Structures are given as C-alpha cells and as structure tokens.
C-alpha cells in the first residue's frame, strides 16, 4: 500500500491540494475554494478542509494557481505616495482584507506622476494580477485604456463617479471643501482663504467646493487663494501662514487642504502671537494623528481612509469571485470634527 509520502507529487515533495481534498472528503474545487476563503463554501466544509491542511502541513502553491488562472496570486495597488499617512492607513486596511485570501499586494508608488503610473500599469499587466486597486481618476488616456482593455478587475479609490461599468469607493472631495466653507461662514468669518500644496486632483476638488460656497455667499476673494506644487508638510504650513497674514492681515478664516499644513500653521501662529480662533479660524482636512493634540485642538474634516481601503478590497474580491455588484459606487462620506481652532 502506498504511503502518503509516496503520493506527494510536487517537485518540492510537499503535500498537494488533491491530498487535502481526499483527507477532508470533499471535491478538489471545494478544497480550493475553502482555502481561498470564498463565501460559497459552507463553514462545515471550510473547517474540514483547513483541518486536513493543518494535519498534512499543506502549503498553497501560488505559482501553480497563477499558471492555472493565467494570473498571479497578487493584487496591484497603485497609490501616489508612501510618505503620506493617508495612504499608509489605506494600505494597512487593504492588506487586512487580502491576507486571509492568500493574496499579496504589489504596491506601486506613482509619486503623483502620470508617466510613472502608466509604467507601473504596463509592468503589472505583463503578468496580470488577480485584481487592481488604483487611486482616483486622473490619469493619462493611454494608461486608462490599458486598464479598460484588460480583463483584470479594477476598483478606484478615494473618488467617486457614476460612470457605467466603473467600481469605486471614496467620498466627494468637492462636498468636503464646501462643508469647510460653510463652517467658517457660520462662525462669522468673511475673508476666507484656501491654502493648498501638492495640488493633486483631490486637493483641487476640495478647493472647487470651498470656492463655490464662497461665491454663492458673495465672499470669494481670489487674492486669498494660496497654492503651491511643493509637497505638503508641517513646515510648509507654517511658512504659508506667515506669507498669507503678512500679505493679507485681514484674513479671518483659513481652510488648509491637508492637516499637516494646518498643524504647521497653528505652530507658526503661536510663534507670531496670532490668536486662533480669535483672530483667524483654522480648518484642516483628514483628521490625521496629532490633530486632536494641537494647541488649540484642530477642527478638521475626518476622512474614512482605512474604511476606504477595506471596502475597496472587499469590492474587488467580489468582482474577482464573479459576484453581482449592486452598488458600484460606494460613498463613505466624511465628518466635520469641530474642535477649538474654528
């Protein structure tokens, strides 16, 4: 009688999925689905398969799975920055969802460059991943054509659209900017500035929403718009505040497009003896770490960064599993967190 050792057929000598299925007394396809965490397999079968895998010390062979499906056991995740806390939170949440399915992340940093993003997309599609998660909708036509022409499921993060056939998870950046303007106006601020750095599409959308409300209220002053392509940072926020109040000492409300800019502005205001919110009210964006610990505590718009990553990853898994998607565009919204600075 042949032993289990003699039935091992991998070149590595490790147990095969077929052996796991046999020990669990299920079909090969059921064993495969159970180990991949698909919801179509009953919990009693999942436990039997996992127990058999543990007993046999079975290790999945991602190369074989990729060969069978013509796709790698990985998901390509394209983000514009690895130094921005916003995207770190999102990546952690994506990993949390993908890991139990045995999927690895191929993290591509586009550095806010269309050319860099297109290069990454071309590279990943030469050995197609199981799925793609990409940030926003602002990319070159050729890069978008690559995504559209591929059969790789794709979910867009951070922004929303109702375009047919597009799956996305995010929030309305424009509405968030509008909420900041309405809050400052409600506080009695009449000379409101929008201070922005990096100038990625989402930052610009926030500015559009902010200006739309000011225009509708007859309060828009183009001279109070402060924009720079420089990377957003705490130091830059302080520098931009000093420049703004020196040029326009009458400013009484400021919406900073990122919390790091706003935090830097609060530090600089204390150095300059400017009372916040007495002389000028300050609103940030994202509710990053430290926002609640500033002096004064920062009023900001909280974004669901981790939940965007978690929800986008789950939506992608549903697409990969061929499930029917009832809601292709998922709006997770934002929250105005009122503290002491405005």
Image (tube, rainbow, N blue to C red):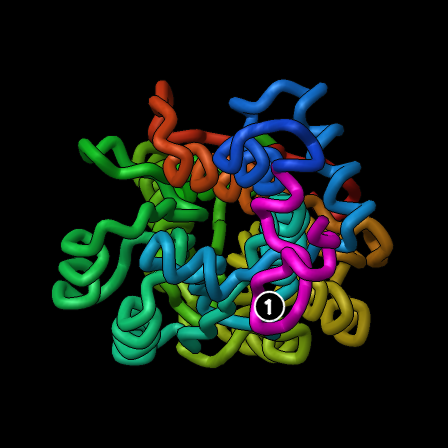
Residue in the image at 54% along x and 52% along y? 255
Magenta region, residue range:
1-21
The quadrant in which residue 325 appears is: top left
Q: Main secondary structure of the magenta part?
A: loop
Quadrant (top left/top right/bottom left/bottom right) for the C terminus: top right
Residue in the image at 65% along x and 28% along y? 25
- Asked whether residue 10 is drawn in magenta, I would say yes
Image spot of residue 34 (x, y percent):
60, 34
Q: Nearer the viewer, residue 224 or 92?
A: 92
The quadrant in which residue 254 appears is: bottom right
Q: Nearer the viewer, residue 64 or 102?
A: 64
Image spot of residue 223 (x, y percent):
36, 64
- Asked whether residue 229 is drawn in magenta, I would say no
Image spot of residue 47 (x, y percent):
75, 29
The residue that disc 1 covers is: 84
* Residue 319 in the figure: left or right of residue 239: left
Q: Judge whether 104 appears above or below 151 on screen.
A: below
Residue in the image at 75% along x and 39% along y? 52
């Amino acid at each position: 009688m042949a032993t289990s050792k003699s039935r091992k057929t991998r070149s590595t000598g490790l147990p095969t999925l077929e052996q796991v299925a046999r020990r669990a007394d299920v079909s090969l396809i059921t064993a495969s689905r159970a180990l991949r965490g698909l919801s179509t397999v009953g919990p009693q079968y999942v436990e039997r398969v996992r127990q058999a895998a543990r007993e046999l010390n079975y290790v999945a062979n991602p190369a074989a799975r990729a060969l069978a499906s013509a796709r790698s056991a990985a998901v390509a995740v394209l983000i514009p920055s690895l130094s921005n806390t916003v995207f770190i939170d999102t990546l952690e949440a994506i990993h949390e969802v993908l890991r139990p399915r045995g999927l690895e992340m191929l993290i591509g940093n586009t550095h806010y460059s269309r050319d860099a993003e297109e290069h990454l997309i071309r590279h990943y599609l030469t050995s197609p991943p199981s799925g793609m998660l990409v940030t926003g909708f602002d990319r070159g036509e050729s890069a978008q054509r690559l995504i559209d022409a591929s059969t790789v499921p794709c979910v867009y993060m951070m922004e929303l659209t109702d375009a047919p056939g597009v799956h996305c998870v995010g929030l309305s950046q424009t509405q968030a900017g509008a909420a900041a303007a309405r809050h400052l106006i409600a506080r009695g601020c009449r000379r409101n500035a929008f201070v922005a750095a990096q100038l990625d599409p989402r930052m610009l959308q926030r500015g559009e929403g902010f200006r739309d409300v000011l225009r509708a209220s007859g309060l828009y002053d183009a001279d109070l718009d402060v924009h720079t392509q420089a990377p957003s940072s705490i130091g830059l926020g302080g520098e931009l505040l000093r420049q703004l109040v020196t040029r326009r000492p009458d400013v009484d409300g400021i919406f900073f497009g990122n919390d790091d800019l706003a935090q830097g502005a609060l530090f600089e205001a204390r150095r300059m003896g400017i009372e916040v919110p007495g002389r000028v009210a300050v609103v940030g964006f994202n509710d990053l770490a430290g926002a609640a610990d500033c002096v004064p505590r920062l009023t900001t718009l909280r974004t669901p960064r981790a939940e965007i990553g978690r929800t986008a990853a789950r939506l992608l898994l549903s697409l990969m599993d061929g499930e029917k998607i009832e809601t292709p565009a998922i709006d997770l919204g934002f929250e105005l967190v009122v503290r002491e600075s405005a």
